[in-house]
Amino acid sequence: MSKVRTRKNNTLILGMLGSICYATGDWIMMYGDATLISQKIGWFTKGTAQIPGWKNNLAMLLSYPGTILYAICLFSFERYIPNEKHKKIFHCLNIINLTPWMALHLIYIVILYAFHFMMTEGYEDVAIPISEALYNHFSWIIIMSLLFMMPLFLYFFWLLITGRTTFKKSMALAHMIPIMLFLICITLMLPESGFKMGFKNGLSNESLFISFLIFYIHSCFTSIADTNDVKDS
């Protein structure tokens, strides 16, 4: 059975940059005094009430290059899937996955900016009920976005853990799902603070950054089987 050295996958660097774009947006739209103003929704704190509009604009602006960089990187993982059927499924799920990223980001930003505007422009009495109503009205978009986004990551995790890629099965530990579960455990141990707010809001993008970094290092130093030698499953 022939072996080839894995080509260094530089597109993973683009994925890390995309993660930084999105995670930066996640942090700047949430980081601040973690004291709750709303007793129902954790978004509405003294900190988010004071976040200026330009930071929300920056968070949204960063999502544009972030989405493009994510797309280039995620599509590059097709090279590690030898079975054409699995590769086509991964490709289709990737297209579906990329659809809601910016929409989800926009919902966060619009609601948080409305909350900030009302809290700083003399509408404090109605800021909480209106912000909570906006969140409740549009919360279905958050759920729908996750339903669009997660199948790709779950499918690739299944491919990894069942040996249907050119990686060893142990590389499933480098997938964003186990990394995210580990980071969630860390979050649960953190005291309530601005750091926790930002860290928690950026969990998915922080997990992807770590995952891409591990896969990039792996692509630099590890030999894997030629895709022609891997049997279809």
Image (tube, rainbow, N blue to C red):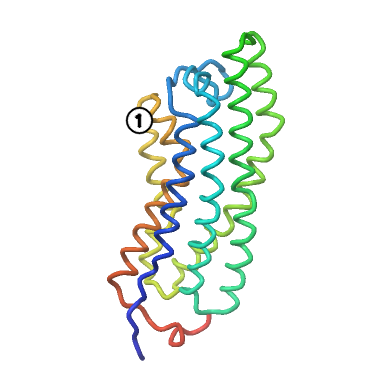
- Residue for badge 1: 190
Judge left or right: residue 102 versus residue 80: right
Q: Position of residue 211 (x, y in %)?
A: 39, 56
Total numbered labels? 1
Vertical arrangement, residue 108 with respect to residue 9, above or below: above
Q: Residue furthest front?
A: 54
Judge left or right: residue 195 versus residue 153: left
Q: Find residue 166 and report its image quarter.
A: bottom left
- In the image, what residue occupies the spot 41% across and 36% down? 199
Vertical arrangement, residue 90 with respect to residue 44, above or below: below
- The kind of residue on which mark 1 rests is Leu
- In the image, what residue occupies the spot 50% across and 23% down? 51
Classify mark 1: helix, strand or loop.
Answer: loop
| The N terminus sits in image quarter | bottom left
Q: Say if residue 179 shows up in the picture.
A: yes
Q: Position of residue 8 (x, y in %)?
A: 35, 71
Q: Position of residue 210 (x, y in %)?
A: 37, 52
Mark 1 Cα-neighbour bin, 10 Å: few <14, some 14–19, many ≥20: few
